[in-house]
Amino acid sequence: MRANKGFTIIEFGVVIVIIGILAATALPRFVDLTGDAQTASVQAIGGAFGNGVNLSHASWIAQGATAGINSTALEGGITVGMNDTGWPENDAGGGGDGTITSAECILVWNSILSSAPAIATDTSGEYQATVATPICTYTFNASAGRTIAYNSATGAVTITVP
């Protein structure tokens, strides 16, 4: 009598069918990772932006917290334009006048984030900057509903993800 040394063709077929069923059930979980990755990206960038805003405000306070100081220097030689309440509003050259435009929102974004994702006032960048004074809204163009909002009057940064 010969000893069996492997699978029969029927056993092999059953194993293949079971693996196919498991793969078909798991596939939707792996396909949905794009949305999770986009959410994580927006949250990370929003967190970094919020930390940069708070760091620049703390630097403004350390320099005397004086209204009219229109810029503050951060570590690494980065200069950020501030408004009279000590929140980033503009690039260092322009100072703060209490209002903020879409172009100034872009300047704040690029000043605060050292390796900032591409941003524009239209959809040509990775993010789109819009403004409803005093709030800059940075919308992630690759996926609807993912935004970072910055209030230049209070320094509040709000991250919205679906």
Image (tube, helix red, strand yellow):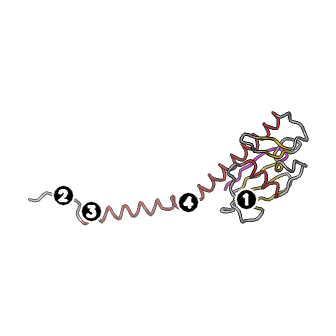
Q: Amino acid at mark 2?
A: Lys
- Circle 1 sits on which residue? 119
Query: Is residue 39 left or right of 71 when viewed as pictured?
Result: left
The residues bearing labels 4 and 3 have C-alpha atoms spaced at a distance of 33 Å
Secondary structure under the numbered disc 1 in the rendered image:
strand
Taking the spot 82% from the left edge, 44% from the top edge, the residue there is 87
Residue 107 lies in magenta, yes or no? no
- Circle 4 sits on which residue? 32
Q: Point out the frontmost of discs 4 and 3.
A: 4
Estimate the x, y position of residue 17 in percent, counting from the top left. 35, 65
Q: Quadrant of residue 54?
A: top right
Q: Amino acid at mark 1?
A: Ile
- Circle 3 sits on which residue? 11
Nearest to the observer: residue 130 or residue 1: 130
Nearest to the observer: residue 113 or residue 15: 113
Secondary structure under the numbered disc 4 in the rendered image:
loop
The quadrant of the image that shows the N terminus is bottom left
The label number, if any, that marks residue 27 in the structure image: none
Q: Residue furthest left?
A: 1
Q: Which residues are magenta?
A: 152-162
Estimate the x, y position of residue 116 in percent, counting from the top left. 69, 53
Question: Which class describes the residues within 10 Å of circle 1: few (<14), some (14-19), or many (20+)?
Answer: many
The residues bearing labels 2 and 1 have C-alpha atoms spaced at a distance of 63 Å
Which comes sooner in the sequence, label 4 or label 1? 4
- Circle 2 sits on which residue? 5
Note whether 33 is above or below 83 in the view shown.
below
Q: Point out the frontmost of discs 2 and 3.
A: 2
The residues bearing labels 3 and 1 have C-alpha atoms spaced at a distance of 57 Å
The residues bearing labels 2 and 3 have C-alpha atoms spaced at a distance of 13 Å
Taking the spot 82% from the left edge, 54% from the top edge, the residue there is 104
